[in-house]
Image (cartoon, rainbow, N blue to C red):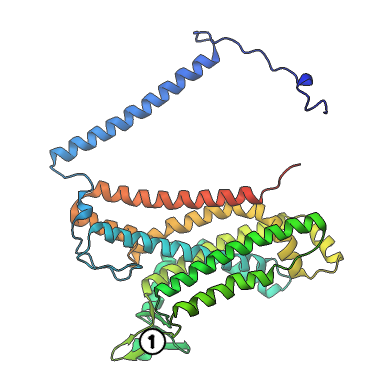
Amino acid sequence: MSASTDPRFASPGPPKRPLRLSWGDERVRGIVWQVLVVGIVVSVVYWLWSNTVHNLEVRRIATGFGFLSREAGLPIGESLIPYDPSNTYLRALTVGVLNTLKVAVIGVILATLLGTVVGIARLSNNWLLSKLAAVYVEVIRDLPLLLQLLFWYTILQGLPGPRQALNPIDGVFLSNRGMKLPFIEWTSAHWWTLLVMVVGIVLTWLYARVARAKQYADGQPRKVWPAGLALILGFPLAVWAAFGAPFTPDIPELRGFNFRGGLTVSPEFFALLIGLVTYTAGFIAEIVRAGIQAVNQGQWEAAEALGLRRTEVLRKIVLPQALRVIVPPMTSQYLNLTKNSSLAVAIGYQDIVSIANTTLNQTGQAIEGIAIIMLVYLTISLSISLFMNWYNAKIALVER
């Protein structure tokens, strides 16, 4: 046993002084100040609460969340779950939360991909590509997001009508009523297929970890792709065939003055998504560029000396190290994108802010409506922060 780990050689800490009830003792002063600050905060909160309750009673304004069970009578243009104006306010607000989550999840994924590509392009040896990426970043970041959302919404509203809709790809139509895409009707068989695929991805990941650990132990490489192919594609296809999931796409067709069939992406959602993705990608691009440049140049030179191509060096050596610099500020951009989605009310997309505002206007429950909005965004933001902090700790360097 070394001297550093033997408790006999451990140096004893300084002796603890007894707590003296004197203002001269710094511990007593610390406790007093903490109690005083907590008391002031509690008093302010209590005064605000009692004052609010008194004012509401004087003006005979009802409080509480009982209105959530009343009929909403609120039309909502698009929703991920079935909704009818005869449903309750709770159902309407749930639709708003899901619409917000839809924008946030898709926006985060697309902004990450676009921002990473633009950030790498800024470091390209191609002069034209590098300058185009730099112009994109500078222009996008210097324009207010609300202005960009209005710009994209105006562009989409200026598209021709359904009869003269743009048809860039067979089965895809773009008009002032949104984008129409081919769509496969989702059934329970598709859900089972998706569940088996997710389980297959998890099992493949676990098998890859076990194979890597065995390779470190005996030096023998093991192929993971055959098992992964069977788990991720083979079993889901077997479940899909067993349950008879339909695979015939519903192609949109022009009938009368509008399209029938297919999947509709509304102009409001499309404009919001484009604006959020392009705006946030400008900031993510700079984060990616800074993370790549933070990696020592010797890493590039050593990898190129081994004969690796530049793309392989970037993918296998530089980016994994750059992630430790990229992830913390990237978390802030994910949070910003989620919170910036509240600007959807400016272009008519019905997210949680839009539906909650309509609800509080109809019911007069302003405090409850604002509280619901705050709770939704707080929950989403904390969830993103927890996940990103977990991922950041996972990829952090471990000192030996």
Q: Where residue 163 sits: x, y (%)? A: 34, 91
Q: Relative to 400, is 10 above or below?
A: above
Question: Looking at the figure, which quarter contains the C terminus?
Answer: top right
Total number of numbered discs in the rendering? 1
Question: Looking at the figure, which quarter contains the N terminus?
Answer: top right
Q: Relative to residue 45, is residue 35 drawn left or right?
A: right
Q: Relative to residue 214, is residue 115 drawn left or right?
A: left
Residue in the picture at 79% in, 20% down? 9
Residue in the picture at 46% in, 70% down? 192
Mark 1: few, some, or many residues within 10 Å (few <14, many ≥20)?
Answer: many
Q: Where residue 306 sits: x, y (%)? A: 86, 65
Mark yes or no: residue 144 visible: no
Q: Closer to the camera, 168 or 119?
A: 168
Q: Callout 1: helix, strand or loop?
A: loop
Q: Amino acid at mark 1?
A: Pro
Q: Relative to residue 395, is residue 142 drawn left or right?
A: left
Q: Closer to the camera, 274 or 386?
A: 386
Q: Where residue 121 sits: x, y (%)? A: 66, 69
Residue in the picture at 45% in, 74% down? 190
> What residue is disc 1 on?
252
Residue in the picture at 39% in, 70% down? 269
Q: Relative to residue 128, is residue 179 drawn left or right?
A: left
Which residue is farthest front? 242
Mark yes or no: residue 359 visible: yes
